[in-house]
Image: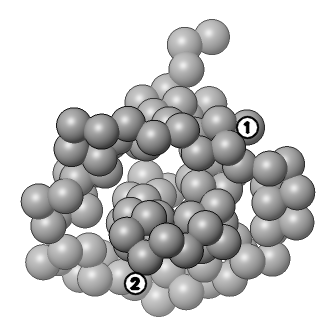
Amino acid sequence: MILNIKVEDKSYRIDVPADVLDDGDAFFRKMDKDMDRGWQMSREYVPNPDIEQRCQIAADRLLTAMHNNNKHSLLLMAGYIMTRLPNVEWVDIDTTGDMNETRFNFEKN
């Protein structure tokens, strides 16, 4: 499956293999458990992030993985977003330092 990422004026297509989506469930649940304890989202501490905020956190980690050339982490973060936000087509990742400004666009069915 493809997840499109927009970072500033550049676009990227991330091809997430089905096995990442199928076999990543334990990792995704661990991420959720970690975020259940709250998360520092830029300047704001969020005690119980909702699904969109959790995916903003994952998108921020995805951007870090892109910068570090960490393909494994990149695929896991993309997989997390895809499993938590069905029909997501685009992720527009904020690079100004406020992950709360990351936006998601969905396929129209």
Between the residue at mark 2 and the residue at mark 1, the CA separation in whole angstroms equals 30 Å
Question: Which residue corresponds to the image point at 53% horizontal and 30% vertical from the top-left?
Answer: 89
Residue extending farthest to the front is 69
Q: Earlier in the sequence, mark 2 or mark 1?
A: 1
Residue extending farthest to the top is 109
Q: Is residue 48 visible?
A: no
Residue nearer the viewer, 61 or 39 = 61
Q: Position of residue 16 (x, y in %)?
A: 71, 49
Residue highlighted by disc 1: 1
Question: Which residue corresponds to the image point at 43% horizontal and 52% vertical from the top-left?
Answer: 52
Q: Quadrant of residue 59?
A: bottom left
Which part of the image, by quadrant, shows the C terminus? top right
Residue highlighted by disc 2: 38
Please state which amino acid type lies under the numbered disc 2.
Gly
Q: Is residue 43 above or below residue 79?
A: below
Q: Is residue 34 above or below residue 95?
A: below
Q: Position of residue 70 (x, y in %)?
A: 55, 74
Question: Which residue corresponds to the image point at 38% horizontal and 36% vertical from the top-left?
Answer: 11
Residue nearer the viewer, 86 or 67 = 67
Disc number lying in front (2 or 1): 1
Please state which amino acid type lies under the numbered disc 1.
Met
Q: Position of residue 86 (x, y in %)?
A: 64, 38
Question: Which residue corresponds to the image point at 64% horizontal and 61% vertical from the top-left?
Answer: 75
Q: Is residue 58 above or below residue 5?
A: below
